Image: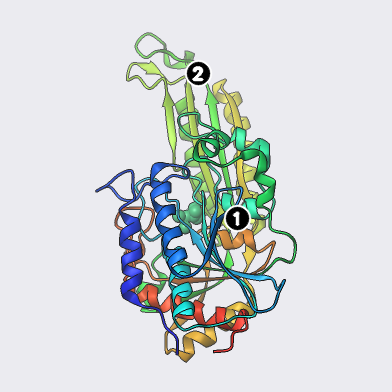
Amino acid sequence: MLEAKTERIRKDIETMAGFTATPGKGMTRFSFSKEDRMTRDYIASEMKGAGLTVFEDAAGNLFGRREGTVPGAPAVMIGSHFDSVKNGGAFDGPAGVVMGLEIARVLQENGIAAEHPLEFAALVEEEGARFGGGLYGSRAMTGKVTREALDTFKDRDGVSAAEAMKAFGFDPDKIGEAVRPKGSLKAFIEMHIEQGPILESGGTDLGLVKTIVGISQREVEILGRPDHAGTTPMDMRCNALTAAAEAVLFLDRAAKEAAGGTVGTVGRMEVFPGGANIVPGRVFFTIDVRSVYMEKLEQVTGSFAAFLKELEKKHGVTISVTDKLTVRPVEMSAEILGLFEAEAAKRSYTSKVMQSGAGHDAMIMASAADVGLVFVPSKGGRSHCPEEWTDYGQIKKGVDVVLGAVLSLAKTAV
Ligand code: HGY
Ligand code: MN
Ligand code: MN
Protein backbone atom coordinates (compact mmCIF):
# COMPACT_ATOMS: atom_id res chain seq x y z
CA MET A 1 0.00 0.00 0.00
CA LEU A 2 1.33 3.47 -0.85
CA GLU A 3 2.15 5.54 2.20
CA ALA A 4 3.55 8.89 3.29
CA LYS A 5 7.02 9.38 4.73
CA THR A 6 7.00 10.84 8.25
CA GLU A 7 10.53 12.22 7.93
CA ARG A 8 9.59 14.42 4.95
CA ILE A 9 6.49 15.66 6.82
CA ARG A 10 8.66 16.65 9.77
CA LYS A 11 11.11 18.51 7.55
CA ASP A 12 8.36 20.49 5.83
CA ILE A 13 6.65 21.51 9.06
CA GLU A 14 9.89 22.44 10.83
CA THR A 15 11.16 24.43 7.84
CA MET A 16 7.95 26.44 7.56
CA ALA A 17 7.87 26.93 11.32
CA GLY A 18 11.03 28.99 10.90
CA PHE A 19 9.20 31.59 8.82
CA THR A 20 7.55 33.56 11.64
CA ALA A 21 7.50 37.25 12.60
CA THR A 22 7.64 36.28 16.28
CA PRO A 23 10.46 33.75 16.71
CA GLY A 24 10.27 32.17 20.16
CA LYS A 25 6.69 33.35 20.56
CA GLY A 26 4.89 31.02 18.18
CA MET A 27 3.84 31.43 14.59
CA THR A 28 2.92 34.84 13.22
CA ARG A 29 2.63 34.65 9.45
CA PHE A 30 0.29 37.26 8.01
CA SER A 31 -0.76 37.21 4.37
CA PHE A 32 1.38 39.18 1.92
CA SER A 33 4.14 39.62 4.50
CA LYS A 34 7.85 38.73 4.33
CA GLU A 35 7.06 35.52 6.25
CA ASP A 36 4.40 34.72 3.64
CA ARG A 37 6.98 35.18 0.89
CA MET A 38 9.52 32.86 2.56
CA THR A 39 6.90 30.17 3.13
CA ARG A 40 5.40 30.51 -0.33
CA ASP A 41 8.85 30.18 -1.92
CA TYR A 42 9.55 27.04 0.09
CA ILE A 43 6.22 25.45 -0.81
CA ALA A 44 6.66 26.35 -4.49
CA SER A 45 10.12 24.77 -4.58
CA GLU A 46 8.80 21.58 -2.97
CA MET A 47 5.91 21.52 -5.46
CA LYS A 48 8.38 21.86 -8.35
CA GLY A 49 10.51 19.11 -6.80
CA ALA A 50 7.44 16.87 -6.86
CA GLY A 51 7.02 17.47 -10.57
CA LEU A 52 4.07 19.87 -10.28
CA THR A 53 3.35 22.90 -12.46
CA VAL A 54 3.31 25.80 -10.00
CA PHE A 55 1.05 28.84 -10.35
CA GLU A 56 -0.64 31.53 -8.24
CA ASP A 57 -4.19 32.74 -8.77
CA ALA A 58 -5.32 36.38 -8.74
CA ALA A 59 -6.16 36.17 -5.03
CA GLY A 60 -2.63 35.11 -4.10
CA ASN A 61 -3.35 31.40 -3.55
CA LEU A 62 -0.48 29.09 -4.54
CA PHE A 63 -1.09 25.84 -6.43
CA GLY A 64 0.83 22.91 -7.85
CA ARG A 65 -0.97 21.07 -10.67
CA ARG A 66 -0.51 17.53 -11.97
CA GLU A 67 -2.34 16.82 -15.24
CA GLY A 68 -4.63 13.79 -15.59
CA THR A 69 -4.96 11.32 -18.44
CA VAL A 70 -8.52 12.41 -19.34
CA PRO A 71 -8.41 15.83 -21.02
CA GLY A 72 -10.81 18.38 -19.49
CA ALA A 73 -11.68 16.20 -16.48
CA PRO A 74 -12.50 18.24 -13.33
CA ALA A 75 -9.65 18.51 -10.85
CA VAL A 76 -9.34 16.96 -7.41
CA MET A 77 -7.90 19.69 -5.18
CA ILE A 78 -6.25 18.98 -1.81
CA GLY A 79 -4.50 21.23 0.68
CA SER A 80 -5.13 23.92 3.28
CA HIS A 81 -3.94 27.42 4.24
CA PHE A 82 -0.47 28.67 5.20
CA ASP A 83 -1.22 31.94 6.97
CA SER A 84 -1.47 31.93 10.76
CA VAL A 85 -3.05 33.77 13.67
CA LYS A 86 -0.85 36.05 15.79
CA ASN A 87 1.48 34.01 18.07
CA GLY A 88 -0.17 30.81 16.88
CA GLY A 89 1.16 27.33 16.23
CA ALA A 90 3.16 25.65 13.47
CA PHE A 91 0.53 23.10 12.46
CA ASP A 92 -2.72 25.04 11.93
CA GLY A 93 -2.90 25.15 8.14
CA PRO A 94 0.60 23.92 7.22
CA ALA A 95 -0.28 20.34 8.24
CA GLY A 96 -2.76 20.32 5.35
CA VAL A 97 -0.39 22.00 2.90
CA VAL A 98 2.28 19.42 3.79
CA MET A 99 -0.32 16.68 3.27
CA GLY A 100 -0.57 17.84 -0.33
CA LEU A 101 3.19 18.10 -0.84
CA GLU A 102 3.72 14.59 0.51
CA ILE A 103 0.96 13.05 -1.61
CA ALA A 104 2.44 14.76 -4.68
CA ARG A 105 5.83 13.18 -3.86
CA VAL A 106 4.36 9.70 -3.32
CA LEU A 107 2.46 9.86 -6.63
CA GLN A 108 5.58 11.05 -8.45
CA GLU A 109 7.99 8.48 -7.03
CA ASN A 110 5.55 5.66 -7.73
CA GLY A 111 4.76 6.91 -11.25
CA ILE A 112 1.01 6.97 -10.56
CA ALA A 113 -1.19 8.22 -13.39
CA ALA A 114 -4.65 9.59 -12.54
CA GLU A 115 -7.55 10.26 -14.88
CA HIS A 116 -8.40 13.53 -13.13
CA PRO A 117 -5.91 16.39 -12.75
CA LEU A 118 -4.76 17.00 -9.19
CA GLU A 119 -4.21 20.42 -7.66
CA PHE A 120 -2.25 20.91 -4.45
CA ALA A 121 -3.36 24.11 -2.72
CA ALA A 122 -1.67 26.52 -0.31
CA LEU A 123 -4.35 29.09 0.47
CA VAL A 124 -3.99 32.62 1.84
CA GLU A 125 -5.72 34.60 4.62
CA GLU A 126 -7.85 31.78 5.97
CA GLU A 127 -7.47 33.09 9.51
CA GLY A 128 -8.32 36.69 8.70
CA ALA A 129 -5.64 37.60 11.25
CA ARG A 130 -4.45 40.51 9.10
CA PHE A 131 -7.61 41.80 7.40
CA GLY A 132 -10.45 40.28 9.47
CA GLY A 133 -13.13 37.84 8.31
CA GLY A 134 -10.88 35.16 6.86
CA LEU A 135 -11.54 32.18 4.58
CA TYR A 136 -10.38 34.63 1.92
CA GLY A 137 -8.48 32.29 -0.42
CA SER A 138 -11.39 29.85 -0.76
CA ARG A 139 -13.95 32.67 -0.87
CA ALA A 140 -12.01 34.23 -3.77
CA MET A 141 -12.03 30.89 -5.65
CA THR A 142 -15.81 30.65 -5.20
CA GLY A 143 -16.63 34.21 -6.17
CA LYS A 144 -17.36 35.55 -2.67
CA VAL A 145 -14.69 38.29 -2.53
CA THR A 146 -15.65 41.60 -4.14
CA ARG A 147 -13.16 44.16 -5.42
CA GLU A 148 -14.54 46.75 -2.99
CA ALA A 149 -14.03 44.39 -0.04
CA LEU A 150 -10.31 44.46 -0.85
CA ASP A 151 -10.42 48.21 -0.19
CA THR A 152 -12.57 48.11 2.96
CA PHE A 153 -10.80 45.17 4.68
CA LYS A 154 -7.79 46.78 6.39
CA ASP A 155 -5.08 45.63 8.78
CA ARG A 156 -4.20 47.27 12.13
CA ASP A 157 -1.99 49.80 10.34
CA GLY A 158 -4.83 50.81 8.04
CA VAL A 159 -3.30 49.03 5.02
CA SER A 160 -6.10 47.60 2.85
CA ALA A 161 -5.98 44.10 1.42
CA ALA A 162 -5.79 45.71 -2.04
CA GLU A 163 -2.73 47.79 -1.10
CA ALA A 164 -1.04 44.79 0.51
CA MET A 165 -1.74 42.64 -2.56
CA LYS A 166 -0.32 45.29 -4.89
CA ALA A 167 2.82 45.65 -2.78
CA PHE A 168 3.19 41.88 -2.92
CA GLY A 169 2.79 41.67 -6.71
CA PHE A 170 -0.90 40.82 -7.14
CA ASP A 171 -3.44 42.99 -8.95
CA PRO A 172 -6.61 43.40 -6.83
CA ASP A 173 -8.52 44.51 -9.94
CA LYS A 174 -8.12 40.96 -11.22
CA ILE A 175 -9.67 39.30 -8.15
CA GLY A 176 -12.51 37.96 -10.32
CA GLU A 177 -10.01 35.83 -12.25
CA ALA A 178 -9.49 33.69 -9.14
CA VAL A 179 -13.01 32.29 -9.47
CA ARG A 180 -12.94 28.63 -10.55
CA PRO A 181 -15.28 27.89 -13.49
CA LYS A 182 -18.39 25.88 -12.56
CA GLY A 183 -17.71 22.15 -12.84
CA SER A 184 -13.93 22.56 -12.96
CA LEU A 185 -13.47 21.00 -9.52
CA LYS A 186 -14.57 17.48 -8.68
CA ALA A 187 -13.51 17.53 -5.01
CA PHE A 188 -11.72 19.59 -2.41
CA ILE A 189 -10.09 17.65 0.42
CA GLU A 190 -8.49 19.28 3.44
CA MET A 191 -6.53 17.76 6.29
CA HIS A 192 -6.25 19.84 9.46
CA ILE A 193 -5.31 19.54 13.11
CA GLU A 194 -8.41 19.06 15.29
CA GLN A 195 -7.60 22.05 17.50
CA GLY A 196 -9.64 20.42 20.27
CA PRO A 197 -9.32 17.55 22.79
CA ILE A 198 -11.64 14.87 21.39
CA LEU A 199 -9.24 12.70 19.36
CA GLU A 200 -6.39 12.74 21.88
CA SER A 201 -8.67 12.06 24.86
CA GLY A 202 -10.25 9.13 23.03
CA GLY A 203 -6.94 7.79 21.74
CA THR A 204 -8.36 8.02 18.21
CA ASP A 205 -6.07 8.42 15.22
CA LEU A 206 -8.32 10.41 12.89
CA GLY A 207 -11.41 12.65 12.93
CA LEU A 208 -13.69 12.36 9.89
CA VAL A 209 -15.61 15.61 9.78
CA LYS A 210 -19.35 15.43 9.03
CA THR A 211 -20.34 19.06 9.74
CA ILE A 212 -18.52 22.37 10.13
CA VAL A 213 -20.16 24.98 12.36
CA GLY A 214 -21.72 28.15 11.03
CA ILE A 215 -19.75 31.29 11.94
CA SER A 216 -20.62 34.95 12.34
CA GLN A 217 -17.75 37.41 12.86
CA ARG A 218 -18.42 41.11 13.38
CA GLU A 219 -16.49 44.21 14.41
CA VAL A 220 -18.12 46.62 16.88
CA GLU A 221 -17.20 50.26 17.51
CA ILE A 222 -18.62 52.10 20.53
CA LEU A 223 -18.26 55.88 20.55
CA GLY A 224 -18.68 57.62 23.92
CA ARG A 225 -16.92 60.75 25.16
CA PRO A 226 -13.35 61.02 26.48
CA ASP A 227 -13.29 62.97 29.77
CA HIS A 228 -11.03 63.64 32.71
CA ALA A 229 -11.15 60.57 34.98
CA GLY A 230 -10.81 62.69 38.10
CA THR A 231 -13.20 65.53 37.57
CA THR A 232 -16.08 63.90 35.69
CA PRO A 233 -18.83 62.68 38.07
CA MET A 234 -19.93 59.06 37.52
CA ASP A 235 -23.45 60.06 36.45
CA MET A 236 -22.16 62.50 33.86
CA ARG A 237 -19.98 60.11 31.88
CA CYS A 238 -20.43 58.61 28.47
CA ASN A 239 -18.03 55.74 29.03
CA ALA A 240 -17.54 53.58 25.92
CA LEU A 241 -15.75 50.86 27.89
CA THR A 242 -18.53 50.41 30.45
CA ALA A 243 -20.95 49.83 27.59
CA ALA A 244 -18.48 47.43 25.92
CA ALA A 245 -18.05 45.47 29.15
CA GLU A 246 -21.81 44.95 29.41
CA ALA A 247 -21.85 43.81 25.75
CA VAL A 248 -19.12 41.22 26.42
CA LEU A 249 -21.01 39.74 29.36
CA PHE A 250 -24.27 39.73 27.37
CA LEU A 251 -22.63 37.74 24.56
CA ASP A 252 -21.33 35.16 27.04
CA ARG A 253 -24.80 34.72 28.54
CA ALA A 254 -26.57 34.60 25.15
CA ALA A 255 -24.23 31.87 23.85
CA LYS A 256 -24.64 29.79 27.03
CA GLU A 257 -28.44 30.18 26.89
CA ALA A 258 -28.50 29.13 23.21
CA ALA A 259 -26.75 25.86 24.25
CA GLY A 260 -26.26 23.07 21.65
CA GLY A 261 -22.52 23.73 21.64
CA THR A 262 -23.07 27.35 20.62
CA VAL A 263 -20.09 29.58 21.45
CA GLY A 264 -19.57 33.34 21.54
CA THR A 265 -16.23 35.08 21.94
CA VAL A 266 -14.87 38.61 22.15
CA GLY A 267 -11.27 37.94 21.17
CA ARG A 268 -9.93 41.39 20.49
CA MET A 269 -10.65 44.72 22.20
CA GLU A 270 -8.94 48.09 21.90
CA VAL A 271 -9.65 51.05 24.20
CA PHE A 272 -9.04 54.65 23.10
CA PRO A 273 -7.43 56.98 23.89
CA GLY A 274 -6.12 54.43 26.42
CA GLY A 275 -4.92 56.63 29.29
CA ALA A 276 -5.27 55.63 32.94
CA ASN A 277 -6.75 59.02 33.74
CA ILE A 278 -9.07 59.33 30.74
CA VAL A 279 -12.66 58.08 30.56
CA PRO A 280 -12.61 55.83 27.44
CA GLY A 281 -14.18 57.66 24.53
CA ARG A 282 -13.98 54.84 21.97
CA VAL A 283 -13.83 51.07 22.08
CA PHE A 284 -13.30 48.63 19.18
CA PHE A 285 -13.94 44.92 19.64
CA THR A 286 -14.67 41.76 17.67
CA ILE A 287 -17.35 39.15 18.20
CA ASP A 288 -17.20 35.56 16.94
CA VAL A 289 -20.34 33.40 17.27
CA ARG A 290 -20.55 29.75 16.15
CA SER A 291 -23.12 26.98 16.12
CA VAL A 292 -24.00 23.91 14.09
CA TYR A 293 -27.60 25.20 14.32
CA MET A 294 -28.19 28.22 12.05
CA GLU A 295 -31.24 29.22 14.10
CA LYS A 296 -29.08 29.42 17.24
CA LEU A 297 -26.41 31.42 15.43
CA GLU A 298 -29.11 33.87 14.33
CA GLN A 299 -30.67 33.89 17.82
CA VAL A 300 -27.40 34.95 19.46
CA THR A 301 -26.36 37.51 16.84
CA GLY A 302 -29.90 38.91 16.73
CA SER A 303 -30.27 39.29 20.51
CA PHE A 304 -26.79 40.81 20.69
CA ALA A 305 -27.70 43.42 18.08
CA ALA A 306 -30.87 44.29 20.03
CA PHE A 307 -28.86 44.61 23.25
CA LEU A 308 -26.48 47.07 21.58
CA LYS A 309 -29.49 49.30 20.87
CA GLU A 310 -30.37 49.22 24.58
CA LEU A 311 -26.78 50.13 25.45
CA GLU A 312 -26.94 53.17 23.17
CA LYS A 313 -29.90 54.50 25.14
CA LYS A 314 -28.57 53.55 28.56
CA HIS A 315 -25.08 55.00 28.10
CA GLY A 316 -25.70 57.69 25.48
CA VAL A 317 -23.12 56.05 23.22
CA THR A 318 -23.20 55.48 19.46
CA ILE A 319 -22.56 51.91 18.32
CA SER A 320 -21.71 50.70 14.79
CA VAL A 321 -21.33 47.08 13.70
CA THR A 322 -19.48 45.76 10.61
CA ASP A 323 -20.21 42.25 9.34
CA LYS A 324 -16.86 40.54 8.54
CA LEU A 325 -17.99 36.98 7.91
CA THR A 326 -21.21 35.01 7.92
CA VAL A 327 -21.12 31.38 6.85
CA ARG A 328 -23.83 28.77 7.40
CA PRO A 329 -23.08 25.34 8.91
CA VAL A 330 -21.86 23.02 6.14
CA GLU A 331 -22.20 19.25 5.69
CA MET A 332 -19.20 17.43 4.19
CA SER A 333 -19.67 14.91 1.33
CA ALA A 334 -20.94 11.57 2.68
CA GLU A 335 -19.23 9.80 -0.25
CA ILE A 336 -15.82 11.24 0.59
CA LEU A 337 -16.34 10.61 4.30
CA GLY A 338 -17.06 6.98 3.38
CA LEU A 339 -13.79 6.80 1.41
CA PHE A 340 -11.91 8.11 4.47
CA GLU A 341 -13.62 5.53 6.71
CA ALA A 342 -12.76 2.64 4.37
CA GLU A 343 -9.14 3.79 3.93
CA ALA A 344 -8.63 4.19 7.68
CA ALA A 345 -10.03 0.71 8.30
CA LYS A 346 -7.82 -0.77 5.56
CA ARG A 347 -4.78 0.67 7.34
CA SER A 348 -6.07 -0.23 10.83
CA TYR A 349 -6.18 3.43 11.85
CA THR A 350 -8.94 4.28 14.32
CA SER A 351 -11.32 7.05 13.29
CA LYS A 352 -14.33 8.89 14.56
CA VAL A 353 -17.01 10.90 12.73
CA MET A 354 -17.24 14.36 14.31
CA GLN A 355 -18.12 17.99 13.81
CA SER A 356 -15.72 20.89 13.50
CA GLY A 357 -16.02 23.88 15.84
CA ALA A 358 -13.30 25.57 13.80
CA GLY A 359 -13.99 27.07 10.41
CA HIS A 360 -12.06 25.74 7.42
CA ASP A 361 -11.67 26.50 3.73
CA ALA A 362 -13.51 23.23 3.03
CA MET A 363 -16.75 24.87 4.22
CA ILE A 364 -16.42 27.53 1.52
CA MET A 365 -15.23 25.16 -1.21
CA ALA A 366 -18.42 23.12 -0.63
CA SER A 367 -20.20 25.55 -2.98
CA ALA A 368 -17.90 24.49 -5.83
CA ALA A 369 -17.05 20.81 -5.20
CA ASP A 370 -17.66 17.76 -3.05
CA VAL A 371 -15.65 18.35 0.11
CA GLY A 372 -13.94 16.24 2.73
CA LEU A 373 -12.04 17.12 5.89
CA VAL A 374 -9.82 14.85 7.98
CA PHE A 375 -8.58 15.81 11.46
CA VAL A 376 -5.41 14.68 13.17
CA PRO A 377 -5.11 14.96 16.98
CA SER A 378 -3.97 18.10 18.80
CA LYS A 379 -1.79 17.63 21.88
CA GLY A 380 -3.76 18.75 24.91
CA GLY A 381 -6.42 20.00 22.49
CA ARG A 382 -4.48 23.24 22.20
CA SER A 383 -4.30 25.46 19.12
CA HIS A 384 -3.92 29.14 18.15
CA CYS A 385 -1.02 29.23 20.60
CA PRO A 386 2.72 28.42 20.53
CA GLU A 387 2.01 25.17 22.42
CA GLU A 388 0.11 23.77 19.40
CA TRP A 389 1.52 20.32 18.55
CA THR A 390 0.69 17.17 16.58
CA ASP A 391 3.08 14.20 16.37
CA TYR A 392 4.47 13.74 12.86
CA GLY A 393 3.47 10.09 12.92
CA GLN A 394 -0.13 11.16 13.50
CA ILE A 395 0.02 13.58 10.56
CA LYS A 396 1.35 10.70 8.47
CA LYS A 397 -1.79 8.67 9.20
CA GLY A 398 -3.97 11.53 8.03
CA VAL A 399 -1.92 11.87 4.84
CA ASP A 400 -2.20 8.12 4.18
CA VAL A 401 -5.99 8.24 4.43
CA VAL A 402 -6.29 11.28 2.16
CA LEU A 403 -3.90 9.57 -0.28
CA GLY A 404 -6.21 6.56 -0.43
CA ALA A 405 -9.27 8.74 -0.98
CA VAL A 406 -7.50 10.77 -3.69
CA LEU A 407 -6.46 7.60 -5.53
CA SER A 408 -10.15 6.57 -5.69
CA LEU A 409 -11.57 10.02 -6.48
CA ALA A 410 -9.01 10.80 -9.18
CA LYS A 411 -9.39 7.24 -10.57
CA THR A 412 -5.87 5.98 -10.63
CA ALA A 413 -4.54 2.71 -11.88
CA VAL A 414 -2.41 1.64 -8.91
O1 HGY B 1 -11.29 30.55 13.36
C1 HGY B 1 -11.22 29.41 12.94
O2 HGY B 1 -12.04 28.58 13.24
C2 HGY B 1 -10.10 29.00 12.04
O3 HGY B 1 -8.98 28.74 12.83
N1 HGY B 1 -9.81 30.03 11.08
MN1 MN C 1 -6.82 28.67 12.80
MN1 MN D 1 -6.69 26.52 10.17
The numbered disc on residue 238 is 2
Q: Nearer the viewer, residue 294 or 399?
A: 399
Q: Nearer the viewer, residue 214 or 336?
A: 336
Instruction: Residue 406: name its quadrant.
Output: bottom right
- 355 displayed left or right of 149: left
Q: Badge 1 is on which residue?
A: 138
Q: Residue at x 43, y 21 (%)?
A: 280
Residue 235 lies, in percent from the top left, at 47, 16
- 23 displayed left or right of 289: left
Q: How many marks?
A: 2
Q: Residue at x 45, y 29 (%)?
A: 157
30 w.r.t. 329: above or below: above
| Label 2 CA crowd tier, 10 Å (few <14, some 14–19, many 20+) | many
Cα–Cα gap, marks 2 and 1: 42 Å
Task: Give the residue type that dot 2 points to.
Answer: Cys
Element assignment for label 2: loop
* Residue 352 visible, this orientation: no
Residue 210 lies, in percent from the top left, at 58, 72
Q: Residue at x 55, y 33 (%)?
A: 163
The numbered disc on residue 359 is none
Instruction: Residue 5: name its quadrant.
Output: bottom left
Task: Give the residue type that dot 1 points to.
Answer: Ser
| Label 1 CA crowd tier, 10 Å (few <14, some 14–19, many 20+) | many
- 88 displayed left or right of 52: left
Give the residue furthest to the left.
24
Q: Nearer the viewer, mark 2 or mark 1?
A: 1
